[in-house]
Amino acid sequence: MKKRSTIAVVVLAGLVVVGYATRSHWMGGEKAAGPARARVVAVELAKAQRKPVPVDVDAIGMVTPMSSVALKSRLETTIMSVHFEDGAKVKEGDLLFTLDSRQIDAQIEQAEGTLARDQAQLAGAERDVRRFADLIGKGATTQVSLDNARTQTDILAGTIKADQAMLDNLKVQKSFTMIRAPFSGRISAANVKVGNFVRPADTASLAVINQMAPVYVTFTVPQRVLADLRDAMTADTTKVIATIPNSERSETGKVAMVENTVDSTTGMVTVRGIMNNASEVLWPGILVQTKLIVRVEEGVVVPTVAVQRSQTGNFVFVVKDGKAQVQPVEVDRTFQGQSVITTGLSGNEDVVVDGQLLLTQGTQVEARTRKAGA
């Protein structure tokens, strides 16, 4: 028993010696062997760029047609034909409706007959004038007969003018029976069909045509940009971009006019842009996201996500020699995910766009590959 106790003490002492000898491994000896390594934070970087940046104003606009006409009948008659499909594109001069013209055709024929009769009577009266003029030279008739013949000629000449005016008026009435497109555009659904009786007093139109290209986009901007906008209009450098919400489709144009009064209750002024709209991207009546570019000026831009905020103002983390440095900046405005910096950066600096929460002044950093789609 005593021998076993001795052996146990020897084994225990050996384990203590081995444990002490290997303490550097199981107690983190590698760290203890040298000084602590500084923490390195992986971040994403972007370049501050100096480039032309537009000065713009965002607004909500409405598309309105430059020209819109409600077609109506100028005669009391019946629809004989409809020559278009509902919602179709029409060109200037296209025949749209044909009205019943039989009554006017009969009146035209009657007026033409009356004109022909009076022209024949005028020709007879002119022959009488020539005959009486010959006879009075021979003393075979009186001056009264010649004067009466001339008077009859003048009367018939006036009658023929009235007949011709009547005939021309009927031809104008006849033209009203063929309703044509006054300009190119897109027509609405026809409100009447073949056989409907129409008249000028009807309140409802036969159809409506809206001009689709070009179109207007009407929106409002703050009065503070009015002076710059007027200068840009004088230099013809304005630009208007209208984008359909939740879509990448847009149209570009320029400012056509500025309303002559500022709304005193809101401090806003109405602006109208003219858009080419050749592909009919913009549809009359829809709301669009409008961007008015007043001018383009040079500036330093960084991604907006790089700008951080604190109680003392805005700042960015600039990486120099592998370390993050806090750089206070002043932001003038944002444009398409970019912030325009007025002071604090001169361009070409490396700024942190992801990983700022782990950074402080002087933190060592290393750049990592930017995530796809970031």
Image (tube, rainbow, N blue to C red):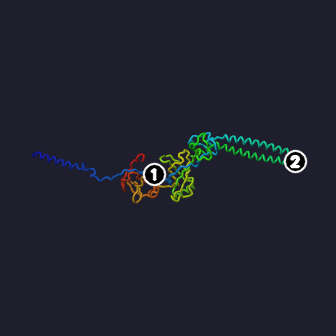
Q: Amino acid at mark 1?
A: Gly
Residue that appears at 24% across and 48% down: 26
53 relative position to 365: left or right: right
Q: How many marks?
A: 2
Q: Nearer the viewer, residue 255 or 331?
A: 255
Q: Between residues 268 and 170, which one lies in front from this camera angle?
A: 170
- The spot of residue 60 in percent (x, y) is 50, 52
Q: CA distance from mark 1 to mark 2?
A: 104 Å
Earlier residue among tags 1 and 2: 2
Tell me the kind of residue under disc 2: Thr
Q: Does residue 267 lie above or below 146 as drawn?
A: below
Residue placed furthest toward the left: 1
| Mark 1 or 2, closer to the camera | 2
Categorize mark 1 by other alpha carbons within 10 Å: few (<14), some (14-19), many (20+).
few
Measured as percent of width and height from the top left, residue 134 is found at 87, 45
Left or right of 344 in this view: 152: right
Question: In the shown orientation, is residue 28 left or right of residue 373?
Answer: left
* Closest to the observer, 274 or 5: 274
Residue 142: which disc?
A: 2
Q: Quadrant of the N terminus?
A: top left
Q: Does residue 278 appear anywhere in the picture?
A: yes
Q: Residue under circle 1?
A: 337
